[in-house]
Amino acid sequence: MIRIEARDTQSLAWNLGLPVISATLALLLAAIPLTLAGAPIGESYFYMFMGVFGSKFAFSEMLTRATPLIFTGLAAALAFRAKLWNIGAEGQLYLGAMAAAAIGTGVFDVSGIILIPTIIVFGCAAGAIGMIVPAALKIRFDADEVVTTLLLNFIIVIFLQYMLEGPLKDPMGLGWPQSSPIMDQGMLPKVMERMRIHYGIFIALLCAAVAQFMLIRSVWGFKLRAVGENMHAARHAGLPINSSLLTVAAISGALAGLAGVSEVAGLKGYLTADLSPGFGYTGIVVAMLAGLSPAGVVIAALFIASVFVGADSMSRAMGVSSYLADLVVSAALLCVLLGGFLTKYKIISVASQSGSSR
Amino acid sequence: MNYKKVLSLKNLSKSFGRIVANQDVSLDLYQGEILALLGENGAGKTTLMNMLFGHYIPDSGHIEVADETGHFSELTLGNPQGAIAAGIGMVHQHFTLAENLDAVDNITLGAEPLRSLRRNRSKAEKKIQYLIDNSGLSAPLNIPVGRLTVGERQRVEILKALYRNVRILVLDEPTAVLTPQEADTLFENIAAMAADSLSVIFISHKLREVLAFSHRISVLRLGKNVGEIDTSEADEQKIASLMVGTKTSHPERMVTSVGSPVLRLENLSIAGRGRRDSLKNINLTVFSGEILGVAGVSGNGQAPLAGLISGMLRPEAGQIILDNQEVKQINPAEMIAKRVGRIPEDRHRDGIVGSMSVAENLIIEGLNEKKFQNYGMLKRENISKHAEALLTDYDVRGPGSAAPAQLLSGGNIQKLILARVFHEKPLLILANQPTRGLDMGAAADVAHRLIEARDRGAGIILISEDLDEILRLADRILVMHDGAFVETETRDRAELGLLMAGQAA
Ligand SMILES: Nc1ncnc2c1ncn2[C@@H]1O[C@H](COP(=O)(O)OP(=O)(O)OP(=O)(O)O)[C@@H](O)[C@H]1O
Ligand SMILES: [Mg+2]
């Protein structure tokens, strides 16, 4: 029989080494399906590596992929720190994207240099509302935010489909459910010529830096940590629990909304219903992998983006399914969760405990 | 008493970073013996017992245990399951119960395979009932543990250890949360179990029970053995001088004149979920310059009274008048703003955020002060300076102001909270079991500070199950029973005891 015991001490080295070990373990685990698919391991990982670091273009593709993941990873990390379980980043991303598409295609009469800031502000606001509502329901009616945010995702996607068939539909789009293109002044600048990477990455890094700084150094971050880590003591100390939850909800939603803004106004230039291949959900993986630290989110997002982009290019080179990328990412999450569990608990096989030796 | 050795700790050492918690500590235990392990807060008592129980792995040294036949073998270090298999049980200083489960589930959790738990519940209940009958430790078995009083939770913890058929029982401050009567009952039963060959190590700061119930006393100071003495040859002064090297004195309480009312509760009622959560039409006045002692067995309304004054609970009826103004918004922030200092009963749950630093915990109630923040940004230098000063002033020992508060020893966590409260020079102080778990010196220090605050004009509500403490400190005594107050002039222990039991004297 196996038993689980809480550890009294948690080693710092473990906490720091954990992400690295999990990542390595995940890659090792992924070797199993690769072998089953008949691909030589060494060669596969070589192509995977080259798919990320092989050229400037490859690298820029990885950064492009990491950008939305940093946003959604931050959204999850901050909310989770306050024990507010925002599973709805996917929906909030689309709210931000719809706001960006609407403003960027000229719903309001804004243009010129204020267009980009307007898009960003409205995108953030839309995402924020998408999370404030579930948080308010939690505070007011004790409604479980896991359920409400998850369900909102489906509602928002249906709303999106309606918008793309109706008000936002591109009249020149040959009937495809997509929005009109964003005006040129509304597009985030590109970082480099002939590459897809755009200024969204800088906004994402800035957000991560600010989040990290505010979490540790600001009164707001102090309250958020206290509320998340011991609600009873926070309440006893007179900290405003509800307003802490509402502000973190707004910020979390706004960050997810920014992911949508950056994809529409940075990368694609128009809105479709398949804008996000689950960036909102992957953001949760990123946040967990990062141990809910904003700085860690950047690293975790880069890692996961590398796996996705690398696996894509490997699958093209080796002729195996690109679903392998999903496998590596899931394996990484499992390894992290298991590793995190092992830093807090230890598993003891009762059969092997004779308890004495002579 | 026989002299068959059952346990031998040999030269155990353990450091946490720079802190040497135990250095070369040795300890023997004999069959049927009750050994008291004493020492100041932070002396390393809990750490030593945690090594015995396998929670910590010693840096050096080893542990030998005898099996039923008296045969000695070495205990695998760092393995709680091994310790349990060797017949060692431990009751921790802080609660380890799952709040949403009831006592039966908590007690059987881990002892029985989960699968068979439901099926064998009645069997388990029978065994627990048997243990209760034999130990006198009763607690409601079928309501979630989160709703039990601290005293009841402690009894569940002890039952949980007993349930595992231990031969060696370690109790880390088992009576810290019990009334003297409950403590006496507990020890009478422990003594009976010891006579029946159970060996017991208990940690306590209460010399009265140590002298009354232990056979032998071992003292730690700054992580080292400093002496062992047969209880028959010990007295308070001898022990105290072993523990701290000097003698401590209880502060003298001079009678002073009381001032104007600082707190008035008028016709207050709270209808909680049950008797233990309710207050029935309470009237209470606390004057400036007095210590009002609230005596009573826990579970008689102290919790809602404390909840009310700390702002955690809102009354259904009646009003709170603080400093001649009615408090309209009853919440913790408002109470803090009105200069009410609160020392919570459950320090781990309500008093600190364990994963945040000692310094952060010291300012958690003063976040809005200009000293600690500027435009919403924390002034880290001031915060850590503030912490260093308080740690020195209040003699909080441990791994420093930047370390997570949960690394402090139990008594030092309490000192952290005291520092936070007293430093603000509050108008009204709610002290809910303030000396629980403190060593003699620290407890005397709290008494000094309470008296000092009183003399400066603060009104103090001292809720305590320790009658000696109430008799020593309180200017006026109220007894709580069944959600209501009984005012009394008497200072007679027996009479107070009767009132606490709800019998008119
Ligand atoms: N995990 C840990 N990491 C760092 N320091 C620790 C840890 N555990 C205990 N300490 C430190 O070791 C010292 C001894 O602590 P211990 O808990 O053994 O004291 P104690 O004698 O039980 O005190 P008390 O009477 O207050 O419960 C303290 O200074 C404490 O801060
Ligand atoms: Mg201790």
Image: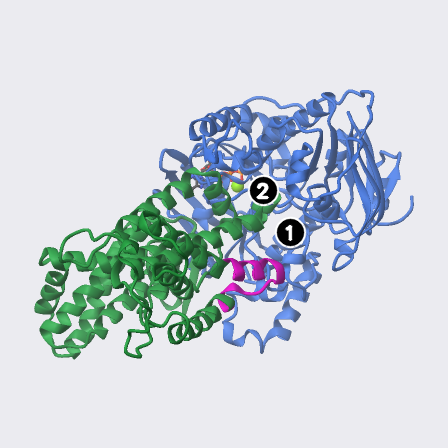
Chain colours: A green, B blue
Say which mark, if any, is on residue B190.
Answer: 1
User: Is residue A138 inside the magenta stretch?
Assistant: yes
- Left or right, A262 with reference to B439: left
The range drawn in magenta is: A132-147
Which amino acid type is marked by label 2?
A: Gly
Image spot of residue B175 (x, y percent): 64, 45
Image spot of residue B73 (x, y percent): 39, 55
* Element class at badge 1: helix
Which amino acid type is marked by label 1?
A: Ile
Taking the spot 34% from the left edge, 62% from the top edge, the residue there is: A105
* Chain containing mark 2: B
Label 2 sits on residue = B351
Taking the spot 61% from the left edge, 52% from the top edge, the residue there is: B194
Viewport quadrant of the C terminus of chain A = bottom left
Q: Is residue B86 above or below residue B427?
A: below
- Left or right, A114 with reference to A126: left
* Element class at badge 2: helix
Q: Can residue A99 be seen by looking at this rendering?
A: yes
Taking the spot 49% from the left edge, 58% from the top edge, the residue there is: A129
* Chain containing mark 1: B
